Amino acid sequence: MNKIFKSFLRFFLFPRYDDRLILIIAGAFTGICSGIAAVFLAKSIHFITELLYGGTFGWYSVLFPACGAFLSALVLYKVFKDEGAHGVPDVIYSVSKFGGALKLRSSLSRLISSALTIGSGGSAGPEAPVVMSGASIGSNIAKLFKLNSRQRIILVGCGTAGAISAIFNAPISGMIFTLEIIIGEWHSRNIIPIAVAAVTGAQTGWFLKGKKSVFIIENAFNFELHDIVSCIGLAIFTGLASILLTRLMRGMSRLTSRIKLPVWCKAPIGGLMVGVIGLLYPYILGEGYEGIQMMIEGNFDRPDYIIWFLFLPAFYILLKSIATSLTIEWGGSGGIFAPSLVIGAFTGVFYYRVLSFLLPGYIWAGEGWYALIGMTGLIAGIMQAPLTGIFLVVEITGGYGIIVPLILVSAISSHFCRFFEPASIYLRSLVENGKLLRPGTDERVLSDLTVMELIEKDCQVIGQHMILRELVLMLKETRRNYFSVKDEVSGKFVGMVHLNDIRPYLMDDLIYDNVFVYQIMHTDVQTIGLDEDLTKVLELMDYHGLFSIPVVVDGYFEGMISKATLLDRYRKELRVQTAF
C-alpha cells in the first residue's frame, strides 16, 4: 500500500516529492478523520444530554451519572477490552516509548465511553477521549502506509491537533497543545504537518457543526491598568485552584486503588456521588459550558447575603473539583480540559467579587472579564502549558483584545504550580514511574537500545584456580583489559580480574606458579542483566567510575558492556532520531 501511494504521488501528482510532502498529505487526511471523530463525540454528548436532561430535572436524575459511568466502564473494559485512565498520558507514553504505536480500537472505544460518561452528567471533558481517538487514527494511518516510527509520531500529533481543533473550533490551540504537551518538541519537521492537520480538523468541525466560538462575547470588555495589575493576584488564585484539583485527583486515585472492586463496579459508585452533588448544584454536571457562558455574561447567581454572594463561586470551585475527581478517578471516561475551564471561570468570578468588596473605590472590568482570565490561569496551571492556556481561551471566546492579561496570568500561574507540583497532571504518573521520555533526552535515545545490542561476546573467561603463568600467556593473545572468572565446577561467574591487578607481578616470574587467579580477582563486582535499562547502566558506570561492566544472567557470564561502545551507539541512535 505504501509503495502504491508513493508511486501515485510520484507519477501523477508530484514528480519530485519527498517524505515531508507525504506527511503533509497524510497529516491533512488524519486531521479530517480526527475532526469527524471529534464532531461525532460532541454530537453524541449533546444527544445523550438532551435525552436525559432535556425535559424535567427530577430526583431520579441523581441516577443518570451512575448509569452512564457503569455503561461507560462496561463498554471500555468488557466490550473493547481497552485500558482506562485519562487517555492523554497514554498517548504521551506511546509517543515517548513506542514510537506512537496505538491500537485501532482506541479510536472508537474512548468516544463511546466518554459520550456515555459526560452525556449522563459526569464531570469531565471531551478533549482527552478525542485526543486518544485522533492519536489512534494517526498511528494507524501511519501503519497503513508503513511509515517509520518518527513519521508515525508526527501523524499521532496530527491526529491530536485535528481532534482538539475540531472539538473547540480552535486550530492554533490544537497545534500548540500537541507540540507543548503531547510531543514535547518544537521542530520544523513537526510543525508544518501538525499545523495542516489542525486546520483541516477545524475546517471539518466548522463544516459539520458550524463555524462559531464555543462561548459568545457580545460586548467588548473595557479594562484599565489596575485590572492588569490585579491579574497577578488572580494568577495566584488560579494556581491554588490548580493545585487543589491536582491533589484531589491524586488522593482520589490512591483511594480507589485500595478498593478491591472491578472498574465497572467502582465507576457507578463515583457516578452516584456526582449525581447527588448535581441534584443540589446542577452547574457541576457534564462539561459545564452553560455555567461558563453565564459567568462571561455576568449573570451568575447573585445571592442577597453578602457572605454567600462572595463565597458561592469558591464553593463551586470545591464542588466541581470533587465531582471531577469522582468521575475520572472512579472509572468514568473523560478529560480535565472542560472541568478546568469551569473551575477557572469560578475562580475568576470569586476573585472579582472579593476584589470589588475589598476595593470598592475602583471600577473593575467585570465578572465576565475575570472569568475569562481565570480560565486561562487554570489551563496553564494544571497542565503547566502556558501557551495552550493563552490561545485556547482566545480562540474559544474570540477575545483577542485581552491577550496581554492572558499572557501575564498564564505565565505566573504555570510557574507557581510548577513550584509546588514539578510535573503536570498529565505527566505526573509518567514521571513517578520513570516512563516520561521526552525527545532529545538521554533517556529517550537510550530507550531504543538494549543490552543485547551492545553486549560484547569476545571476552576471555578463566577459571578461578588458573595459575598466574597461564594468565600472563593469555595476555599476549588478547586486547582485553578485563577477564571474567568462573567457578570450574558450576561454571558460574565469581569475579573479575583487571590488567592492573596483574601488573605488580609481571616483573617477578618466580612467583608465576605460586599465584592463583582467585587470590587477585575482585568479587565485589557490579553486574547487570539483559533487561537492564541503559540509562541506569550509564549512571552506574559513572557513579563507580567504570569503563566496562559484566552482563550476568542466572549467575552465568554472558559478555561485557563498555562505555565506549555504549556512547558510540548512543551517538548513532541520536542521529537516527533527529533525522527526518
Image (cartoon, rainbow, N blue to C red):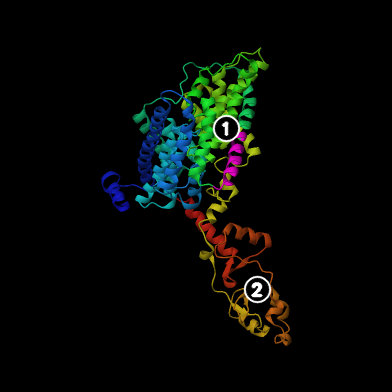
Q: Residue at x 60, y 63 (%)?
A: 563
Residue 246 forms part of the magenta stretch: yes
Query: Counting residues from the N terminus, which is met first, the one under dot 1 or under dot 2?
Result: 1
The magenta span reads 243-260
Residue 321 - label? 1
Q: Looking at the rendering, which quadrant does residue 512 occupy?
A: bottom right
Q: Looking at the rendering, which quadrant does residue 343 occupy?
A: top right
Q: Main secondary structure of the magenta part?
A: helix
Q: Where's residue 468, x and y in %?
A: 68, 83
Q: Where's residue 299, x and y in %?
A: 52, 17
Q: Looking at the rendering, which quadrant does residue 509 occupy?
A: bottom right
Q: Where's residue 334, x and y in %?
A: 48, 37
Q: Nearer the viewer, residue 3 or 314?
A: 314
Q: Nearer the viewer, mark 1 or mark 2?
A: 1
CB of mark 1 within 8 Å of CB of mark 2? no
Q: Residue at x 69, y 79 (%)?
A: 518
Q: Position of 27 compared to 514: left or right? A: left
Q: Tag 1's secondary structure?
A: helix
- Image height check: is 364 above or below 489? above
- Image height check: is 127 above or below 543? above
Q: Nearer the viewer, residue 152 or 128?
A: 128
Residue 115 forms part of the magenta stretch: no
User: Around disc 1, counting alpha carbons within 10 Å, would you say few (fewer than 14), some (14 to 19), or many (20 or more)?
Assistant: many
